Image: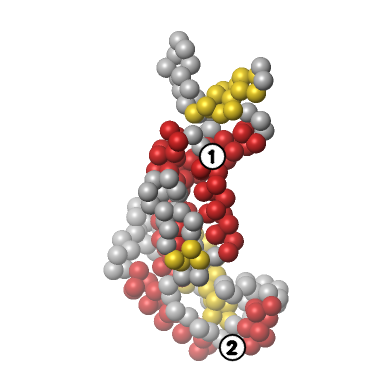
Amino acid sequence: MGRSAGGTDGSTLFDEVTRTDCRGSRHSEALFTFLNRVDSTFFGRVRETLQEWFAHLPESGRPDVRGRIRSGDDHEFMGAFWEIYLHEYLTRSGFSAELHPKIPGTGRTPDFRCRKDSTVIFVEATIIAPPDSEKAANRREAAALDALNRTQVTDFMSGSESWNEGLSRFPWRGSDRSWSAGSHRWTRTTSQSCTSTIPLFPCQSMSSRPTGGSSSSAPFPRSRRNEANSQSGQLEPGVPRRPP
């Protein structure tokens, strides 16, 4: 059980709550949402480090950075993180870093004006973001993978062999249950025709065609040997590790 060092008064990045959720990140889960909820020693240190760097920013720049970190948009998160990281790097390198300085004679306000002795440099923090069409495609794929992960299967692991993006969003609300139920029926049918002592090859593939797209998955039977080896992280060749 973990507790953050943060709060909700605007001076900190993360909520001050007792954390008990140890689950891994969902495909469609925002970076901030995951970091803010997960109870983990490792990610607790990530939160502490980000909070420490955030506190080093000039107070005038914190509301904008905090808002983008907590926005739920991963690209906004990464842009704000890059600014925090660069500010920390510059100050540790001996520079003073002024946020969003005005350049006389222009309307430009770069992210930093950095001074060290007689050296003055201007720095603009920029990340490369994919086009909106690619972001939308990634969201559709993430929703599909999350729906597949909600399928309750005991005898098989399901591996995604291929994914073909569609052009429109699949109506998951109310439909993910039917897909999950269909996946469950598919794996149960497969388990009747395949033995769980042959762990290396998928028995058959299932294709699902959401609106304009398709996916293909294959079952990997779990053998007792692999079930035991999964605890030590040593699986037979060709068999994906069972998620923790």
Measuring from the top left, give residue 1's x and y in whole percent.
50, 70
Q: Secondary structure at mark 1?
A: helix
Image location of residue 31, percent across then percent down? 47, 54
Q: Assign a secondary structure to mark 2.
A: loop
Could you say which is closer to the camera, residue 195 or residue 177?
177
Q: Amino acid at mark 2?
A: Thr
Judge from the rendering whether residue 33 lies leftward or rightward of residue 82; answer left or right. left
Question: Residue 241 got which mark?
Answer: none
Locate residue 90, reporting x and y percent. 62, 33
Q: Which mark is residue 195?
A: 2
Q: Is residue 218 visible in the rendered structure shown here?
A: no
Residue at the image position 59 percent from the left and 88 percent from the top: 195
Mark 1, residue position: 56
Q: CA distance from mark 2 to mark 1?
A: 59 Å
Q: Nearer the viewer, residue 68 or 26?
A: 68
Asked if residue 153 is positioned above or below residue 24 in the image, the reply reads below
Residue type, label 1:
His
Name the N-terminal-most of marks 2 and 1.
1
